Image: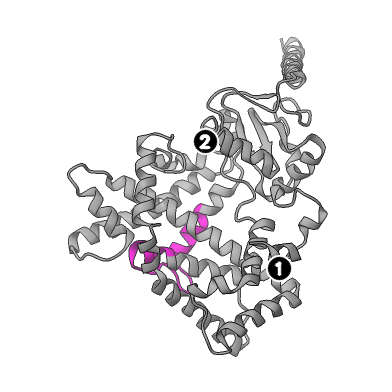
Amino acid sequence: MDFLTVPLVLFSIALICTLLLTSNSRARKSPKLPPGPYPLPIIGNILQLGSKPHQSLAKLSRKYGPVMSLKLGSITTVVVSSPEAAKIILQKHDVAFSSRPVPSAAQCLNHDEFSMVFLPVENQWRKLRKICKEKMFSVPRLDAGQYLRREKLQKLWEYVKECSETGRAVDIGEAAFTTSLNIMSEMFLSMEFAQFNSDSPMKDVVWGVLGCIGSPNFGDYFPILKPADLQGILRQTTIYFGKLLDTFDGIIEERLKSGCGKDDVLEALIELSQRGDAELSRNDIKHLLVDLLLAGTDTTSGTVEWAMTELMRQPDKMCRVRDEIGSLVGEKGQVEESNISQLPYLQAVVKETLRLHPAAPFLLPHKAVSDIEIDGYVVPKDTQILVNIWASGRSMHMARCRFIHAREISGP
């Protein structure tokens, strides 16, 4: 019996692999899909991503073009690697690509059912977008937050000054992250979540969530493996999300009991939830705070860290920034937000940092809601769309990889 079983198993495996190979070969020969590298059976092109997928895909795009197709496990993916192609996807065909694939990590504790990031473009999404625009990002709200931002930056300056005087090294990334986190938490909740150079449970939780969401998950490429959670990402994300949501729930409960109105975002959201039409539920508020806190903290701190890295690599540019600021405010003066328009070189530094080192190398993935034709190719329904903005910022010619060029200063 064993003698017959072994050949049968081997034959079955060979047959399955042959069928998969044939299927992939036929799919690749289809003239409708954008060009791309040949996928291996089962795993597709995953091995070609390497440890730095944005760089690997940028290299592949030089061979296959700014719009190319890949197979990541069982997920058909189209990668966009130029500004022109990105405009076609995100502007001309924005409705066709308005949906998003929901990663496994975002489904923990049903976050995707409340998150503005993953909700379909329907009434609830429009309602949350309107609330954010009116209650958080309006000109009066942003102007009112100037004092808060100045206060947190003053604390950052004092911390750096103290480290300089005592001969301690400054972890720029950690310091920028702490400052960004405190600006966000103060603006939303009227409280600080972290301190410089010290342990902070909330800082660790936010770091943990960002790490889990940013980690590649086998379950997203091979849905059959999702329940197994082979990497433990779902378990860890559930723990971190639970801590964040519990913290926000406790803060909301305390605010409701105290009845003391504060001029912050949470107070505005609570007022909306207590109206007769009940625009927001308590769960809506908690998950919205999670989205805003995570998005606002990591992106800002990462940009600051890269900007300082580039300036430290090129001391002449560091000196030019210091001279520009010094000529405007003097040695003992402070830069105000109103001064930014008078600092063109500093603006160029920020723009170049965002071009060469975007806060995330890929935009959040989009998903085709139907078959759509682009430049003679067909992007099938449910295809994942990855916009490689890291590659887009470096796509024109090799000089585009240099930090700060004369053209950046002469521009508007």
User: What is the x, y in percent for residue 404?
Assistant: 73, 65
Q: How many marks?
A: 2
Residue on which the image places disc 1: 310
Q: Quadrant of residue 84?
A: top right
Contact, CB < 8 Å: mark 2 with mark 1? no
**Depth check: 298 or 240 in front?**
298
User: What is the x, y in percent for residue 38?
Assistant: 78, 28
**Depth check: 180 or 345 in front?**
345
Identity of the residue drawn at 37% across and 57% down: 136
Q: Which span of residues is magenta-colored?
A: 184-209
Q: Is residue 190 above or below residue 292?
A: below
Residue on which the image places disc 2: 100
Q: Is residue 311 left or right of residue 62?
A: left
Q: Is residue 386 above or below residue 140?
A: above
User: What is the x, y in percent for residue 113?
Assistant: 39, 38
Which element type, helix, strand or loop, lies under badge 2?
Answer: loop
The amino acid pointed to by label 1 is Glu
Q: Magenta span has 66?
A: no
Kindly report the distance in space between the C-alpha atoms of the residues bearing marks 2 and 1: 34 Å
User: What is the x, y in percent for residue 114?
Assistant: 38, 41
The amino acid pointed to by label 2 is Arg
Q: Is residue 61 left or right of residue 378?
A: right
**Depth check: 397 or 165 in front?**
397
**Circle 2: is it few (<14), some (14-19), or many (20+) Cα within 10 Å?**
many
**Depth check: 236 or 75 in front?**
75
Identity of the residue drawn at 49% across and 62% down: 204
